Amino acid sequence: LFVLLAIYKGQWVRKHNVKLYIIAVILAIVTYFLIGKVKIIEPFIQGYLGLSLLYIVMFTGALKDKSKLKIKLVSVRREYSILGFIFITTHAIRYYLAYFGFLLAIERLAGVLAFFIMIPLFITSFMRIGRKMSRKAWVNLQRFAYLGYVLMFIHLILMADMPNLIVYIVLFVPYFVLKAIKEVKKYRDNKQVK
């Protein structure tokens, strides 16, 4: 649904981004206070909604440059990363508070580290803040997203039961393969230019 929204209504998402952020924050707060009371909020609490948005942001980087799909997704990448972080925060806070004493377990530690890596990425996704940085500094900071994706994957596969484990492997492994192929090709192209 979010991919279709990007393809057909990307301009609308960009135009109403602040309103969408406000709605997302309100929804995140409301769902946090409804934990254990309303079953329908489970996708928020389990982090599925935030993960779906962050997955699109992540996978966009592995798509072929100048492909129609990449162009459409890049146009809302900033907005989706901010919305994804807002929604994943409910999940992070809930489980951080619930399992504070057990954070040394690798599966939880990976999730916490992924979340903390995303905080500066989230902050610098806002144009007013991002513009205050040099382009090089901003790009170098955004590269930490890859470490965040790896930690997120570790967190998900170590925490998941069947069939979710298979779903996470099917979602993430193709991304890592495509991204690796793309980076190797870029490295070879740059080497040939030199």
Image: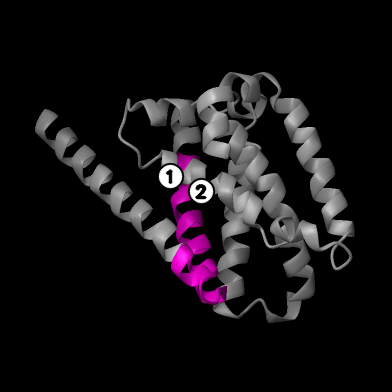
Camera-nearest residue between 110 and 44: 44
Instruction: Identify the residue shown where x is 42% and y is 65%.
Output: 169
Q: Secondary structure at mark 2?
A: helix
Q: Is residue 8 magenta?
A: no
Which amino acid type is shown beneath numbered disc 1? Phe
In the rendered structure, find residue 59 and report the number of the disc placed on it: 1
Which amino acid type is shown beneath numbered disc 2? Tyr
- Which class describes the residues within 10 Å of circle 2: few (<14), some (14-19), or many (20+)? some
In the rendered structure, find residue 97 and report the number of the disc placed on it: none
What x and y, as percent, mark residue 67? 33, 28
Q: Quadrant of the N terminus?
A: top right
Q: Gap between marks 1 and 2, in whole Å?
A: 6 Å
- View extreme (left): residue: 192
Q: Quadrant of the C terminus?
A: top left
Instruction: Identify the residue shown where x is 47% and y is 45%.
Output: 58
Q: Main secondary structure of the magenta part?
A: helix
- The reply to whether dot 1 and dot 2 touch (C-beta < 8 Å) is yes
Q: Which residues are magenta?
A: 140-167
- Reply above or below: 71 against 185: above
What x and y, as percent, mark residue 57? 50, 41
Q: What residue is disc 2 on? A: 55
- Which class describes the residues within 10 Å of circle 1: few (<14), some (14-19), or many (20+)? some
Whether residue 130 is visible here, answered yes or no, is: yes
What x and y, as percent, mark residue 117? 57, 53
- Left of 67 or right of it: where is 127? right
Q: Secondary structure at mark 1?
A: helix
Whether residue 194 is visible here, answered yes or no, is: no
What x and y, as percent, mark residue 44? 72, 55
Q: Is residue 158 magenta?
A: yes
